[in-house]
Image (spheres, rainbow, N blue to C red):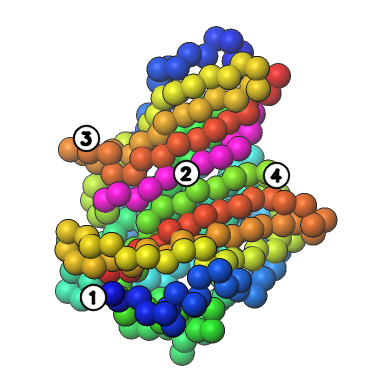
Amino acid sequence: MSLLTDEHKAWIGQTEAPITVEISRRDIQKYAAATEQLQDKYLQGDEAPPMFVFNLFSEIPRMDQLRADGLARSGASGPKLPLKRIMAGGTEIHQHRVIKPGDVLTGTRRLVDMYEKEGASGPLIFMVRELAITNQAGEAVMEEIQTSIAR
Amino acid sequence: MDINALRAGDVLPSREHTATNVSLFMYNAAVWNHHRIHYDETYTTEVEQHPGIVIDGPLQGDWLSQVALNWLGDKGQLLKFDYSNRRAAYLGETLTSGGSITAVDAHSGTVELELYIKNAQGDVITPGHAVVQIQR
């Protein structure tokens, strides 16, 4: 039996509202410390490591918008999935420009695919989202294609 | 870095990472991820039925990207990078990141890398790839 209905699949191709983020040196420094970076340019916050963009272009949910698992309830920006336990699947990035403090970046996310597979421990739903990041000059900074798995 | 001196099969430096409660707290605070499987052990094992606190997949992705970035230093740019979280890793595990060169294109100045994160049993749990541009 298929878990994904036509209502779910109608979300494929839909674009979420763009999110604009100001990049601060301190946020880069925190990320660099937490990820055990070795290079001074990251530890001093002169440049952001490429994976710094993970979760950067997500809405900051309020407390009353969180589910029991700590994740945000799916709002207007995505389908309500019949499977609720979410795991990271993988990521692909294409980097055009490095990110520096003071950059004002806009990320626009689009659901590019959603499909199911039978896993070893039951059904899985794969969600593939593409994030296009541009800077204040309108130049392409990065594309990120991210897969998350619901089980 | 002289691209003409690089060969497919050259091995990049490997590195060990052992996440702790503190390091996972720092990472999840830095990326603003409040999923309980990264800090609430009772919830993680009893409700989501993992064997322990889950080491974030994207954190492993960062460690993997660092194999390329730390090898490259200021001698070039990362153009493309991908990874897949094939198997979960849990607090207490020591993971090893590393990689090797799979292709060198001296004409375009690009080098392709194959990257891995292995667990203590030697299984690749997070494979990845990178393409870097070497400065001329």
Name the residue at 38% across, 48% down: B84
Same subunit under labels 3 and 2? Answer: yes
Name the residue at 42% across, 71% down: B34
In this rendering, the answer to whether A50 lies above or below A70 is above
User: Distance from label 3 to label 1 (Cα)?
Assistant: 37 Å
Q: Quadrant of residue B96?
A: top left
**Mark earlier in primary sequence (3, 2):** 2
Query: Mark 1 belongs to which subunit?
Result: A
What is the secondary structure assignment of the residue under circle 3? loop
| B92 or B86: nearer the viewer | B86
Q: Is residue B52 visible?
A: no
Q: Is residue A100 visible?
A: yes
User: Distance from label 1 to label 2 (Cα)?
Assistant: 32 Å
Q: Amino acid at mark 4?
A: Arg
Same subunit under labels 1 and 2? Answer: no
Residue B121: percent from the left, percent from the top?
18, 38
Residue A77: percent from the left, percent from the top?
54, 78
Lateral position of residue A91 relative to residue B22, left or right: right
What is the secondary structure assignment of the residue under circle 2? strand
Viewer-side label of 4, 2: 2
User: Distance from label 3 to label 2 (Cα)?
Assistant: 21 Å
Q: Which mark is residue A1?
A: 1
Residue highlighted by disc 2 = B82
Region in magenta: B74-87
